[in-house]
Amino acid sequence: MKIRYILLAPVAVLFCTASASATQISHTWVSGSGNDNNTCSFASPCATFQGALANTSSGGIITAKDAGDFGKVSISKSVTIDGANLGSITYDNGNGIYIAASVNVTVQNLTINGLDLASYGIDVTSGGIVIIDHCRIMNITYDGIIFAGAGNLTVENSRIESLSGSNVTGIYIGSNAAENVVVRNTVIDASPVLAENYGIFIASGTGPLEVSLQKVTVMGAGNAAVFTYSGTTEVTGSVITQSSDGVVAASGAMISVASSMITANTIGVCSGTSSKIRLDNNDIYDNTTAIDNCGGIVKTSGTNKISGTITIPAADISESMTF
Amino acid sequence: MKIRNIALASAAVLFCTASISATTIAHTWVSGNGSNSNTCTFASPCATFTGALAKTTAGGIITAMDAGDFGPVTISKSVTIDGANMGSIGFGGQTNGIYVDGSSSINVVIHNLTLDGQGSGEEGVSIINAANVTIDNCKIEGFTDTGINLFPSGAENVVITNTVIDGANVASGGVMTDETAAAIATVALDHVTIKGMTDAAVTSFNGNMQITNSVLTQNQVGVEAQTGAVISVANSAITSNSQGVCSCSGSKIRLDTNDIYDNPTAIADCGGQIKTSGTNRTSGAITATSAEVSHSVLF
């Protein structure tokens, strides 16, 4: 960063420009009537997040002071972007927010609308600590949030909805780098139910990968509500419903599901070869097949309540209560 | 934007029409001081959800930019309506606050909105034809008939979360799948509070419904399954209703880890099946002769 400032300074002197980037402030503002030639102070707000980011010092905050579409933003320094429940990023291609470096970023109170044309909502290529809070991500054709780099991602109090396209995922996780992901108090509405859409998809990779889903509602997935190829995933207090498959582990992945509802899916639970799914104190109802025989291990406590067909060997579910 | 405005002006001059429908946009706005003559952009917000919907592209979003009553709306295409915790729909004297009747492929999201029947509106949300409907973080009150009525003409999935439905001891039902509907709805309720119904907080006549983390209180009946419906209730409170749970002939209600207190009749004898885990806590009379309540803990 210092090197860049040194380079910038002579340019400003030579060309007599406003040199706004040399006078970054810690709290900048955007407005529907702002202008990126402004200083981005409260009294002189900017028009776009990207414009404001250039004038925001590392670790600072950008706030929407009124409603508006503040445009796509690519981030490579630590910052908080607060849409104040007024701001949106409305765009028709690429990423709404692109986090390009291992920095600490919070995005909150913001609507990200890909207009059924853009591929990604938030692309976290490398997370330091990334927090997505009280956001709505909608009309995306590929991944609502994609996190394929090292670091920590928390998604909370958010909605991912109106996914479109032929192969679309609410939250895509996974890489060959260490990732820790928490999704909390969030709704992933994968409907319309398309053949290959997923609520949460965890790709194969060496990780290591830890995923925790807490009080998450996932629905409308044409493929699987929660699908993992790697790492360990814990699901608690959640609702997995109205999807083709509810919870699927494959290729050696492990999922533990406790105190959750897995309901109204074609297949409730499917543990593939070499994989393991633990079930404790869940309500597994109204699935065409409650627990499918997918070749892997399903371990159940005595406190699951299950209706529907169970096709895995009976010995594995002997402790469960059949409803 | 400038280009589009110029184009509009030309069109208006050339054809002398409003030419609005040809220029729907993905994100429209309503405001307490908007006008439906406006374009429904943020800079030029509309006055009603109906006005904004006409100018919203299918799959788009309508957002309230400030507080206001944006009026009842009939929805026939995919859309998200976001009241932003400021907007409301007053539907006094009307049949519906929101009426959803599109094709079997539309997706509708309604959230952060108050629907107020003002003591004379009949139904908060009526859902006829849609693939998926989500109602999140809404308050439905002041209605005289049903909070959310499902009358599906085709298979549909409905999810209701973080919502309060208050019948004020006047309205008949909170959430109801209608007995004469031609098709089946699959319904999930999570973190929903329903109170003050003169009939049942939740009634299902068909399909399956799951209720979790919810409170059904101060109604005539908490949960009622009719004519083959299956309702599953977990981690919820069913309290202070005249009857807590009623499963009618051919129907099934599953109860797991609920608190069923202070209902004069906790589990009524309605002729259907009731399956209980060992982890419900129940007080009050259990009159259901066929109910399998032996696992329940009596408090």
Image (cartoon, coloured by chain):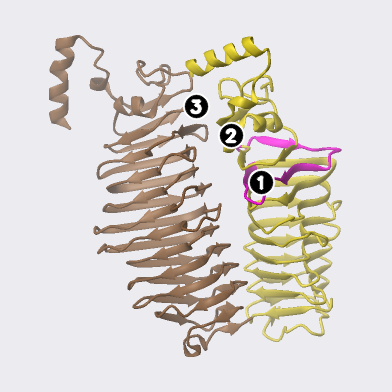
Chain colours: A brown, B yellow
Q: Does residue A122 lie above or below B19 as drawn?
A: below
User: Which span is picked out in magenta?
Assistant: B84-112
Which percent across, then down, holds residue A195?
50, 58
The three-letter amino acid code for the residue at tag 1 is: Cys
How far apart are the alpha carbons under marks 3 and 1?
24 Å
Marked residue chain, label 2: B
Locate the C terminus of chain A by quadrant: bottom right
Residue topped by disc 1? B138
Q: Earlier in the sequence, mark 2 or mark 1?
A: 2
How far apart are the alpha carbons under marks 2 and 1?
23 Å
Q: Could you tell whether A274 is left or right of B239 in the image?
A: left
Marked residue chain, label 1: B
Residue extending farthest to the front is B14
Q: Could you tell whether B14 is left or right of A22 in the image?
A: right
| Residue at 32%, 58% in the rendered image | A174
Marked residue chain, label 3: A
Label 3: state its secondary structure.
strand
Q: Does residue A110 lie above or below A259 as drawn?
A: above
Q: Are marks 2 and 3 on the same chain?
A: no
Residue A67 lies within the magenta run: no
How far apart are the alpha carbons under marks 2 and 3?
18 Å
Locate the N terminus of chain A by quadrant: top left
Residue topped by disc 3? A68
Q: Are marks 3 and 1 on the same chain?
A: no
Residue B109 lies within the magenta run: yes
Q: Does residue B119 lie above or below B249 as drawn?
A: above
Which labelled disc corresponds to residue B57?
2
